[in-house]
Image: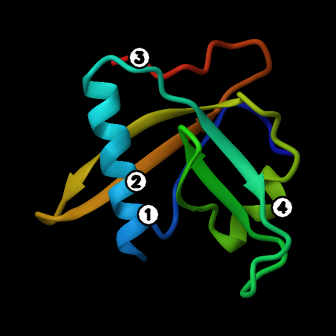
């Protein structure tokens, strides 16, 4: 497992309209003061990569961990992640960076 804390960018957030829309909804929820929860979920039935790690925010799929980083993040405990940075760039593209925090550290995103 990776040495904590460490940050990664969520891959594929602009790959589908569903993932992009899900991330935008999470932006809106954070702006409204709602709690934000991030989870890394193994996706062994993924047709493209049986080692895929899906990133969910508030139980909505927003993207994946890049293939090159998968081994570092397998086994990350539920609740060990939080959003560090997110926004819009190039007019219409969204991005999200996640921090994997040490156990016991508060991982709820505050706005």
- Work out whether residue 91 or residue 21 is closer to the camera in this orientation and state it: 21
Q: Height in image: 30 above or below 72?
A: above
Residue at which label 3 appears: 110
N-term mark: 3 or 2? 2
The residues tagged by marks 1 and 2 sit, at their Cα atoms, a distance apart of: 5 Å
Q: Do the residues labelled 1 and 2 touch (CB within 8 Å)?
A: yes
**In this picture, residue 88 sits left or right of residue 105:** left
Say whether disc 3 or disc 1 marks the residue closer to the N-terminus.
1
Q: How far apart are marks 4 and 1 (CA)?
A: 23 Å
Pinpoint residue 89: horizontal percent, then vertical percent.
20, 58
Q: Tell me whether the residue at label 3 lies in contact with that at label 2, contact meaning CB atoms closer than 8 angstroms.
A: no
* Category of crowding for the residue at label 4, using alpha-carbon neighbours closer than 10 angstroms: few (below 14), some (14–19), many (at least 20): some
Which disc, if any, is residue 71? Answer: 4
Q: Is residue 54 above or below residue 86?
A: below
Does label 4 or label 2 sit earlier along the sequence?
2
State the residue position of label 2. Answer: 22
Q: Where is residue 31 in the image (x, y as percent from the top left)?
A: 25, 26
Can residue 31 be seen here? The reply is: yes
Label 1 sits on residue:
19
Horizontal side, residue 47 vs residue 59: left or right: right
């Amino acid at each position: 497992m990776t040495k904590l804390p460490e940050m990664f960018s969520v891959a594929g957030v602009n790959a589908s309209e569903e993932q992009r829309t899900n991330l935008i909804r999470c932006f809106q929820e954070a702006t409204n003061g709602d709690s934000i929860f991030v989870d890394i979920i193994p996706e062994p039935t993924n047709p493209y990569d049986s080692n895929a790690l899906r990133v969910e925010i508030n139980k909505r799929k927003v993207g994946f961990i890049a293939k090159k980083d998968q081994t570092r993040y397998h086994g990350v405990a539920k609740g060990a992640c939080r959003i560090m940075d997110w926004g819009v760039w190039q007019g219409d593209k969204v991005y999200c960076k996640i921090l994997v925090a040490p156990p016991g550290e508060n991982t709820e995103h505050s706005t």
